[in-house]
Image (cartoon, rainbow, N blue to C red):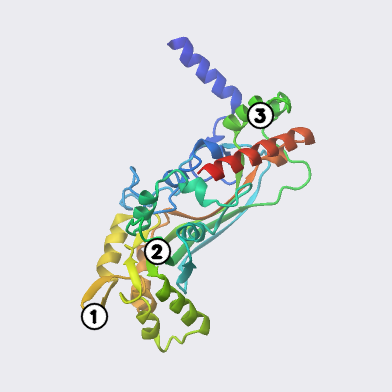
Amino acid sequence: MFLFCLFVLVFSGARSEEGDLGYNLNIGYAIDLFANYGDLGQVTRVVSSDYEDRDDGNDGPAEPFNEKNIRIFANATSSETISNVIDDNMSLLFCDTFEELLEYYFKDFSIEGLSQPWKAFMGDWIPEEIMRTLGIEYNPASENCCFVLAKLSKSHRTVKMDNLTGQVAVKEYVKRAINDLDYNDDAKMRRFMENYGTHYINSYVTGNFIYQVFKYKRVGYNLLKAYMRKGRSKTQPDNLRFYFSSYFLQNVGDIRIASGNKTIEAWARHNLRDSQYLYSRPSLMRLYYNHVLVYKLNQLLDNGALLAMNLKTLKPIFQDRRKGDKFEEIIENDLLLWEVNA
């Protein structure tokens, strides 16, 4: 047992230097996208979920990213912007289908080689689990439905890696691994991906956002879209409120916080109640009419969610064009298969 542990320590030290392996957000670090493909939603705080380590901000916000990553570049630099103000306007995203709802939800996430990034995060989740996480009821019989995603964001930290120019410098242990690669050996190329990653973190935005999904009957959905196309005046907010009434809606989703902070979600359910006719229910549209509530929410929202991310393939680290082309070919083919089957 002692010899086995010693071997693991020596092997790990040969692969990377101290401090080059992390589990939080590190710009320019690489991840193996296939390690958690289809379930990245559990290791990144993008959708409200029952995370095991959720502490609701008692000891500070939770980490928005918890996936193994490794430092690849030796000379990577980045720029960073800090802000702490909630957006002025609420986004209303119109989704004709359930899949379009997921595409719009992850519209600020891009992964090189993937046309549908949402599948990397939730592709392995069953529809019932996805709908429950988004706060709406699961009803497989109601296929002819449309959705409106209401969303209000608060960005905190924006980090972007500077462009890679000239000869890309990589860490020595990565360079040795590349030199040992045979571009004709697919198995070795895939083992390289498992050890050193497939994509690097090119940019990300952290913060938090509150969201709610409204499930519409198609007739009401089309009327709302027509109303929005005509334009509306903020001096007549009740006209918009009318289109979010039970007359048009099939289901009003629960209000959720992207970081999974249950304390803020409970505050929202209590303070954002909208009364119409005989019904009273939580509605994010209350924030449209009440700027005092927006101010209060701005104070409550922590920085425990991932708002946007851009992942790029590691092809630039290969000076040998044949190895780089083969690396890219394997990733593109595998991603296409995984995306179709997710």
Count all numbered tags in the image, as a single digit.
3
Q: Is residue 230 in view from this perspective?
A: yes
Q: Is residue 267 left or right of residue 23?
A: left
Q: Which type of secondary structure does the marked residue at label 2 adopt?
A: strand
How would you rate the neighbour count of disc 1 (Cα within 10 Å): few for under 14, some for 14-19, many for 20 or more? few
Quick one: label 1 or label 2, which is nearer the N terminus? 2
Q: Which residue is mark 1?
A: 277
Q: Residue at x 71, y 23 (%)?
A: 180
> Which quarter of the rendered picture does the N terminus lie within?
top left
Quick one: label 3 or label 2, which is nearer the N terminus? 3
Q: Nearer the viewer, residue 68 or 277?
A: 277
In the image, residue 1 above or below residue 118:
above
Q: Is residue 337 left or right of residue 90?
A: right
Residue 244, how many percent across, how many down?
Answer: 36, 76
Residue 32, how many percent across, how many down?
Answer: 56, 37
Q: Which residue is mark 3?
A: 189
Q: Amino acid at mark 2?
A: Tyr
Give how far apart the Cα atoms at labels 1 and 3 are. 63 Å
Q: Which type of secondary structure does the marked residue at label 1 adopt?
A: loop
